[in-house]
Amino acid sequence: MCQYSIDDYDPHQSSLNEIIYQLYSHTYKSTIFTCYVHLQCNRGPVPSCLDWSEICDGKIDCIDGGRDEEYCWQLEINECGNDEYRCSNGQCIPYVFFHDDSLVPDCLDGSDEVPMYYDKRGNCDKSEPTFACEDITICDGFTELIPVTIDGRNETDETDCEQWQCNNTYTRCDGYWNCLNEADEIDCDSLPLLDCPLHHHICVSSETGRLACLPIEKANDGKIDCLGATDEPNLILRYSFNRQTKQRCHRGFDLRVWLDKDNNLTTTTCLCPPSFYGDMCQYQNQRISLTMQYRALSDAWRTPFVLVVMLIDDSNERTIHSHEQFTYLPMRDCQIKFNAYLLYSTRPKNHSRNYSVHIDIYEKFSLAYRGSWLLPLKFPFLSVHRLAVQLDIPRSLDSIQNCSDQQCVHGHCVRYSHNQDGSTFCQCNQEWSGRYCTIPHTCICSFDSLCIGILANNRSLCICPINRFGPRCLLENTLCELDQNTRCLNGGQCIPNDEHIVSERKFTCICSKGFSGDRCEIADSKIIVSFDKDIPISQAMLVHFIQVIDNASPERATTFKTIPIHQNSIIIYWSRPFHLVFVELFNKNYYLVVIQRTFYPSTTIIRKINSSDRCEHINELFNETIIKLHLLRRIKYYHIPCQRHSPKLSCFYDDIHLCLCNNHGSHRVANCFEFDHHMKSDCLGRSGCENGAQCFQDSSTCAQTSICVCPACFYGVRCQFSTSGFGLSLDAILGYHILPHHSILHQPYPVQISAALTVITVITGLINGVLTLITFRSKKLREAGC
């Protein structure tokens, strides 16, 4: 028997998730107000009422005393840290959240993001030219950069374009008309709908209504020849429409409840989102709007964590008003933002209490405790308190910082992670709670789970092991055990996805080292690089991998490699997609190793680097006059070196770009992208290296591997060992000569000789020991000596 039904839905929608998604995808403009009623305010004649967004908006809306702006001066004097961005309303967010997603602002007033249409032109810096957007900003027929005064002249992206044609390697067949006559988009379709001669467009004729071939000369000539004026880009007008929907439950979900199906007796109810309450979701809730992004070091790349986010107060009970649990896996969720609403257990909240957000982190497999964070709520007068934070997960080597300034009766004092003010709290033992762990309670969680507190409704807060779920961890999750379709290959480990992960798959495979893919089915690519004898090789080098992404900036990852002094080759294993590979030797000497249009996983690439593969600096290619030009002018000459030095020049670079010389038709043209030549990889400022070693990770954001680059006379994983006191030890002398994974027959002569001498010494010592034992078995010799 179905107890609930939905009246208003599209029959083509196949799931409840699809119905709800469609409901919230429409622009909603209600004709009935939703109200915030937890602040005494005379907003005017009925039905006018106060909206939560009108509190601290800079305008007095309450005509009976201006209570909506009474305490807002605290926001005006709020100070942000050096690594934070200050929103227009005074809120602070991490600076890395500034302009990171135009569709989802992190400031409550949206001042950190500028709304824009989804167009790749919108991602470009309008004050400086950049090769990341070169195909749409430089000499394409559309003036898009703000004019810059250079030598008394206003220069833009469309001035001095004699060396830069609108039809080039950036604009060719990209789906945009960069040439007004569409010369850059002509003859791009490999399977055209109509067989037309060269240099003709296919369009629907405005006269016949049929497909026709339009000569390029008739495009953008001021006369409309194609239906919809598609041949006249200067005449096209764009319209946008907003669809309005009428909903009884405002932003809630209208649901029919069957009371008596035989008598056809029903009623309707509204399922309200956390932002609203009431029989029609007409009242606005007090709440915490929380956005979290987590960062982990490479040693935790394959470690799943449980994050428990709790809204607590400062009472002796330390009440947990509401909570959310997330499973965070760095290899899956790096750079992902988690969003949550936390509600107060009473409506309205108790203004005599101070509230905070407390976050605990545990390892998912072992349920071992890693640390906690505290996020105070500084502005209690706000109806919606917005928090956006970026938090660093403590390293596995970091010990839990205990303290003694809290009298924890049935627990122990713990210091919050990365809190500069040294805040502490009592972490209670099982079945104890409260500010000082003095309140007993009965845990109702399963035997193999953790019970970390008591909720406002007197239920236990449980943390489940990997194979269980539910509020009490009583339900078994057999997805990874019984379903053969979820089996991870090559030693991978399956973990179920929770409801916070938006994915078509219900599980994630944690792959062992050397494999990747949804089911760990892809082996790492292998690149064998050797160097010509004319190239001076340094013992340490950087290998840069570049992945080219459509309609986005290229992604870069870098690894650090060492090469023994007697070798001229290295082997690199890489799991991520890549299209370009560069090797960087000392003093920014770049060599092009690999260039491929399509990435093929699990391949072996063998490449010998010659002197001609070196990327030259622009100082070696241009005269001083061009070098001194403003970037806006100089960048328009970058095609010339590729044509002048063709085909010897494969790449070159300036202070902010790396450029390739590619074939484009009958010409050689430059294809450049932004490249940080001064990359700083300090392992998020939490280096575990010792003795002044530099911590180097393969990515500044989502690091999979890291290594300690040891100074002279130090070695070890963390550079924790020293050879300074053993100048004549074999470790110091032969350390760089020993070839790993090679037999003694293939080792260098110094290693073979050293091994032979060591074996001879050991054998001689054994023979001497045996003869000594035989000799001193004689009682007479033991008494008199030799």
Image (cartoon, helix red, strand yellow):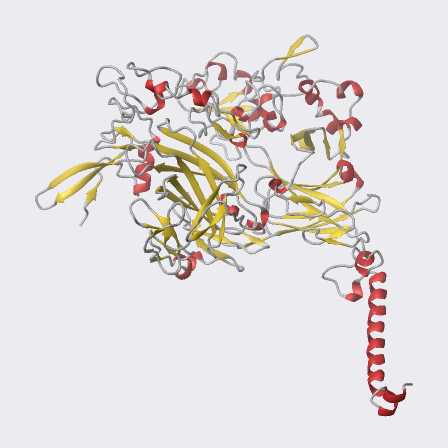
The answer to whether residue 388 is above or below residue 562 is above
* Residue at image coords 66%, 33%: 676
Residue 236 image position (x, y, % from top left): 45, 16
Depth check: give the residue in front, 214 or 548: 548
Residue at 64% in and 21% down:
165
Give the x, y percent position of residue 722: 76, 53
Residue at (72, 44) in percent of width and height: 692
Residue furthest out toward the right: 786
87 and 466: which is toward the camera = 87
Q: Is residue 149 left or right of residue 277?
A: right
Drawn side of residue 413 relative to residue 470, left or right: right
On screen, residue 326 versus residue 629, left or right, reads left
Residue 16 position, x and y percent, is 30, 42
Farthest residue, direction left? 263
Depth check, front residue: 285 or 702: 285
Regarding residue 204, the answer to whether it shows in the image is: no
Image coords of residue 183 (percent x, y): 57, 22
Q: Nearer the viewer, residue 487 or 474?
A: 474
**Is residue 51 among what the camera can see?**
yes
Seen in the picture, residue 265 relative to 759 is either above or below; the reply is above
In the rendered view, does 132 fall on the left or right side of 755? left
